[in-house]
Amino acid sequence: MLKPDPGLLFWMCISFGIVVFLLGKFAWKPILGAVKTREQSIADALNEAKKMRAEMATMTAGNEALMRQAREDRELLLKEARDIRDREIAAAKGKAKAEGDALLARAREDIRNEKSAAATDLKNEVGELSIRIAERILRDKLGDSAAQKALVEKVMNERDLRKS
Amino acid sequence: MKGDTIAAFLHKSLVRAAFLLFALVLSVGLWANDPGSEGAAAKEGSDEGPEKFEVGSFIMDHIGDSHDWHIVGHLHVPLPVILKTPSGLEIFSSARFSGDHHHPTPYAGKFGTYALEGKRVVALDSIGQIDEAATAAMWDLSLTKNAVTLLFCVTLMCLLFIGMARGYAKRGTSAPKGVALFMEPIILFIRDDVSKANIGEKHYQRFTPYLLTLFFFIWFLNIIGLIPFFPFGANVTGNIAIPLVLASVTLILVTVLANRHYWRHIFAMPGVPLGVLFILTPIEIMGHFLRPLVLTARLFANIMAGHIVVLVFICLIFIFGSNSTAGGIGASIPSVLFGTFVNCLEILVGVLQAYVFTLLTSIYIGSAVAEPHHDHH
């Protein structure tokens, strides 16, 4: 049992030699190669992913900075716009007030002028009217000579009375 | 691309060769089978009456090698007997050794007469006595049960792994499928945790293919030995010749590859006083040769012991059965249960011993090619 059989040793050497050679050349070499290639590709993919993630992180940071910058810019612009608007409004208000005042002043002047002109006209009109009325009354009262005489009498009497 | 076509061609030719090989083995064996003898022998066998059940010879018969393949009852598959005699090659079927009624018969070949004495093929002289000188002068290179199982295992491995390699070539870097899905973790384990871990980053790639072949060869043969029906069941790794060849390869590899560092540790261990070296060096030199021997004994003894234990449980049935039939039936239940349990255990032992053998081989190779890195202290 402990003595190896030479025939079996012979066949063992042959068959083991064959299997070592054939599998080494046609099985393990391609299999190990394929596994190695796959492992390499997986490692590469992982590295790539890591790099991408780092890139993404820097990009996100950059984006945030940009966003912040943009927000600041917008704030600034808005503030400027607000200032400009306020200034414009104030300026417009001032101008409008001045114009209004000038208009008002002119209107008052005009009113005053019109008023004095109207007053003058009214005075003239009233004067003329009173003269015309007086003329009409006189014409009516002193149409006949008796009346004229009576009147002269009366006026004379009044003068005499006052002198006496 | 050229490697692919070669592998594809090889795979196809291997399938063809496998069929041819088995056809050849069987036909060489069947040549001399006299058609009338089988039926007559079967009747004869039953007339002989109950023979005494010999446990020892029964077990030895099962774990040993043989020139024909016993399947069941009187059914044997004859195998080719190949004798390298000083005059030339003798090739004939082992069926020629069993004549009518399955009685051992001498066979008269081209260069002499041969007979099967026990498990040994011997040359006979002219008066029918064993001619020891002629027997010693010839080599028995018969394709015995174990040799045929070896060729069967080699064919199986080539079909499986070269087929697998073609699958890898086809699928490129995508995930493994089919048999590769099961085998790839094992291959990666051998590569990373056996080869790389023990031989080191620098040299392991050179030895990984050999270690893979070694592991699967032992493992497959162990499993083939555990399947209890034809064409399996031969106790191959439990035959000393097989682990002996494997361990010799390990010894040759270590001896050839060993660097100065390894030899210095054997012949003059650094940091050891001269007086102690006189004791240590012979031990180290012995160790160099003893390690492969232990490797042989471990695999051989483990597998053979497994086969013996299973057979002992089966024999229990017949031992009890030879006293009374009821005893045999009663013993059969625990025997079969224990036998099955031990067989399951042997599946584990089969993979474990393959792993241990591969691991130790890788460790020995690793020690031979290791770079000196602790010399300065």
Image: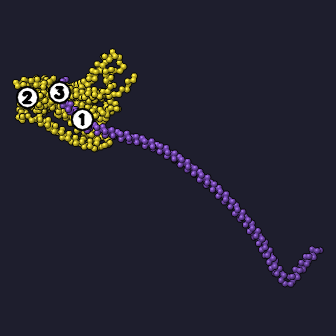
Chain colours: A purple, B yellow
Residue behind mark 3? A6
The reply to whether residue A58 is in sight is yes
Q: CA distance from mark 2 to mark 1?
A: 38 Å
| Residue A28 x, y percent position in the rendering | 28, 37
Please give the count of numbered marks on the rendered protein: 3
Residue behind mark 1? A21
Callout 1 amino acid: Phe
Residue behind mark 2? B112
| Residue A10 x, y percent position in the rendering | 18, 30
Q: Decide: few, some or many residues near mark 2? Use Cα within 10 Å; few <14, some 14-19, many ≥20.
A: some
Callout 2 amino acid: Gly
> For the point 69% across and 63% down, which residue is it?
A103
Of residue B174 and residue B132, the one placed in the foreground of this image is B132
Quadrant in the rendering for residue B121: top left
Identity of the residue furthest to the bottom in this view: A145
> Could you tell me which secondary element the residue under label 1 belongs to?
helix
Q: Are marks 2 and 1 on the same chain?
A: no
Q: Chain of mark 1?
A: A
When the figure is inspected, residue B164 is found, relative to residue B309, above or below; the finding is: below
| Residue A164 x, y percent position in the rendering | 95, 74
The reply to whether residue B344 is in sight is no
Please state if B176 lies on the left or on the right of B23 as rendered.
right
